Each structure stands twice: as structure tokens, then as C-alpha cells.
Image (cartoon, rainbow, N blue to C red):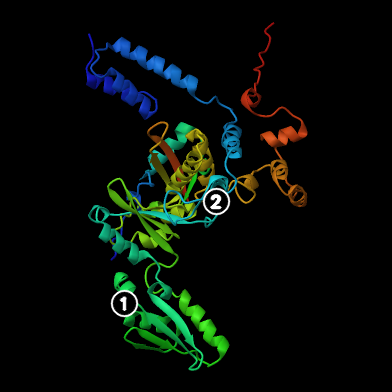
Amino acid sequence: MVTKSAVKDHELVPEHVLLSVEEGVAVLKTYGIEAPQLPKIHVSDPVAKEIGAKVGDIIKVVRRSPTAKQSIFYRLVID
Amino acid sequence: MSISVKEVQQRLDRVDLPQDLIDAILGGLEGVEVTAEQLEEIINQVSADYEHARVEPCEAVGVVAAQSIGEPGTQMTMRTFHYAGVAEINVTLGLPRLIEIVDARKIPSTPTMTIRLTPDYAHDRDLAREVAWAIESTSILHLGSVATDLAEMNVLIELNPGPMEQRKITAEEVAEKLREETGLAADQKENLIVMAPEEPSYRELLQLVEKIKKISLKGIEGIKRVVIRKEGDEYVLYTEGSALRKIMQFDGIDPNRTKTNNINEIAEVLGIEAGRNAIINEATDTLREQGLSVDVRHIMLVADIMTVDGEVKQIGRHGVSGEKASVLARAAFEVTVNHILDAAVRGDVDDLRGVTENVIVGQPIQLGTGDVQLVAKRFEVKQ
């Protein structure tokens, strides 16, 4: 009866990419901000858990946007 | 001197424009010969138009969004309990639903799920029925009748073989479940189950009957009704009650296309980004159902603000408006005295950086050109 499926395959869930430290620093530099100024995501978030994110990581979200087709969003992993 | 499609592609990859504009340029150039200069000219014109269409820096997008959603909201019906096209299933729509969405209620007043099935189940009515019966919470009243025998002081449960076969449950299983849930003995003979309360009192007997009626014998608790509907060429299940996490584990159900209208549940099971998408979908569907069209950008802004902190926050006292940094802005919203009193006790400082607080003190607001601060560079006058 158990047909466990991955959360990230659901049609409501956009693609989440875990960024390396260097990529994260580059993102902060392009926007000229500090990490805490980014939108947040909890470590306990099902998708964050699935990609193995840790507190302090930055996750890049590739959203399917109805206006721009694709838009990039960043979230800081918090407790 | 025209350039190849590949070169056009490469040039466009370096352009900082939204994907759909790049696709539109590519589409327009299909089968057309262009030179490098012409391509530059096209890109420049498109970029200029795009820049022109963009929101200006320091524009009050929040206020515009609030107005753009609020005004159509006044035209919505106040109280609609619609049968969203499906017989029996009752769904809150209109203004109450919109309020529910921005209030981020933990449980909506009418939770429903839209369950889609895997290809092998989706086209077969009988298989779809089977899934529906497997998930629908089955109580004793679905299977038979409950009566009390006052002379013997016991409860008589008569089961009908027909419904039991449909729902794939036997009299033995029913008796076992009843024993488990009540902790009392249950005598089962064929399709008759006899139960007696611990003490032979009139009150206990009636309480036992009520308890038996409430027990969920099979299926998922909280799923009160399941309706099957044919959409296109596949069967879709609609439920009254919502339990997304449990439902996703069931055989025959496509976990990736199954949804609920409970936004908090989606955020919990599928993550905050899915929650954001759910807010956008639910809000646009609610508005569209009423024949109102609001630009998605406004709804997207609302959904973004509600989900920035990693959890779904309401637009209101306990969420976005209540967490503003400025004391005066919070006081202007609701429970004025409390906010000012608390701020005084704590010795809070208001930096007067937002719109509301500057309106209150009578200063120019920091919006549009008002947000730009010019600092003159002082040159030393050379003698």
C-alpha cells in the first residue's frame, strides 16, 4: 500500500537547488545584501529536507511564473 | 551577412530579459534572416520596451495590489455556498473564501481535496469507485443500523451484506474494530453484533450508541464523503474533508497531481513554495469563479509577502501588519492603545521610515521621488 513519492515531484512544488557556499556569496554580492535579508525557508520544510539543506545554506528556487515563464528566487535556510 | 540561428541563440542567452520575452524574440525570428546589427537593434528595442513596462523603483506596489484586489472584492457575493459544479460537495466561494485565504486559517471552513488517479485507475469507473470506497471514512451507519434493546440493556447492530461487500469489510472486522475502540466485548453472530455497556444503566447505553456511531471503521478519518466525477476522459475524486499526507500514500492515487484547498496543509506537506503556489491558485480561482479578473502580479505579491518567513502568515494583526517594525504603523492598523502603551513601556523608537508613520506625523512620505535623498558634494572653492 505504501507508494512513497518524492515531494519535489508534485506539480505545485517548483525546482529547488541547493547552492554551494561560493554560489551563495555570489548571489549576495549581486544583490548587495546580507544573508539574513533574504526570504527564509525552514530546515524542517519537506523540500529542504529532501535536498539535504542545512541551516545557513541558500536555496535557489526556479519558479514557473505566469508572467515571465521562469523566475529565480532565493531563500535562506533557517531553524 | 545574416547570422545563424545558433548565433542568435547564443546572443540571446546573454540578454537580461525574462524567459518568455526571449522565447518571443526567438519565435519571431524563426525563418527570418537577420544580421548581427539587426539583432542588436531588436534586442535594444525589446529591452527598452521592457524597461518602460517595469515597475518604477520606489513605487508603492503593496498599496496598488491592495486596491486591485480590494475593489473587485466589493463586487463579490457576500455569502455563497456553492456546489462547485459537483453534486453534494459544498465549497465556500466568493468573499468569505478570499478572506479565508488571506487570513491563512489553519483549517478552511470547507476543506476539500481534488484527487487525481494514476493512468491505470483513471479511466476505469469501477477501479475509481474502489479507491473512493477505500478512502471514504466508513461508519456503522453506512453498513447497517444500530438499535437498543432496553429489556436486555444492550445495543444491537444489524449489518447489511450488500454495503459490506462494496466497502470490502467483513462482520468479523467490524466486531474487532468495535472491540478495539470501545474496549468492550462484542458478540458477533453472522451479521448481528451485540454489545453491552459496562454498567447496565440507561445513560451508559445511550452513550455507547453515540460512541459506536462515531467510530471510523475503515478509510481515512475526516474524509466524510467522496464524489466521483468524469473530467475529460479521466475520473477525478472530490472529497469532503482533507488529509493530504495520508491520501498520497494510497494505491491508485497520483500523489503528484492531488491537491487540497487547505493552504496550510499544503505548506506543511509539500513545503513553503508549494504553499505560495497554492495561495496564488486558490485566490485566482476564487476571483475568476466570480467573473472578476485581477492581474496575477498583485496576487503573487500577496502570496510572496505571506510566505517570506518560511511559513504561511496571515495579512492581519497576527501576521504581516502586526509585525511591522514601526510602532505608529502598527498602532494605525488595529488595537491602537495597546501598541502605543507597549511601545512606551519598552521605550521603542520609531525611525519614521514607512508611509503610515510619516503621514501621521505630517512629513512627506518616502515613496517615489520622496524616497530619493540627494546629498550635495561640497567643492572647495579655489581661490
Q: Is residue A1 above or below residue B199?
A: above
In the orientation shown, which residue stands out farthest toward the top?
B383
Q: Earlier in the sequence, mark 1 or mark 2?
A: 2
Identify the chain of the residue marked 2, using the numbered disc in the image. Answer: B
Q: Is residue B381 left or right of residue B169?
A: right
Q: Is residue B223 visible?
A: no
Q: Indicate the position of residue A15 as horizontal and vertical percent values.
A: 35, 44
Q: Indicate the position of residue B207 as horizontal and vertical percent values.
A: 54, 82
Identify the chain of the residue marked 1, using the numbered disc in the image. Answer: B
* Residue bearing mark 2: B104
| SS state under label 2 | loop
| SS state under label 1 | helix
Q: Indicate the position of residue B365 as horizontal and vertical percent values.
A: 69, 29
Compare residues B123 and B331 and report the one nearer the observer: B123
Say which mark, if any, is on residue B161: 1
Q: Is residue B337 left or right of residue B240?
A: right
Q: Residue at x 69, y 44 (%)?
A: B333
Compare residues B380 and A49 and report the one nearer the observer: A49
Q: Is residue B338 above or below residue B195?
A: above
- Work out which quarter of the rendered image holds the C terminus of chain B and state it: top right
Q: Is residue B227 visible?
A: yes
Amino acid type at circle 2 is Ala
Q: Residues within 10 Å of mark 2 (few under 14, many from 20)?
A: many
Q: Indicate the position of residue B28 as horizontal and vertical percent values.
A: 30, 19
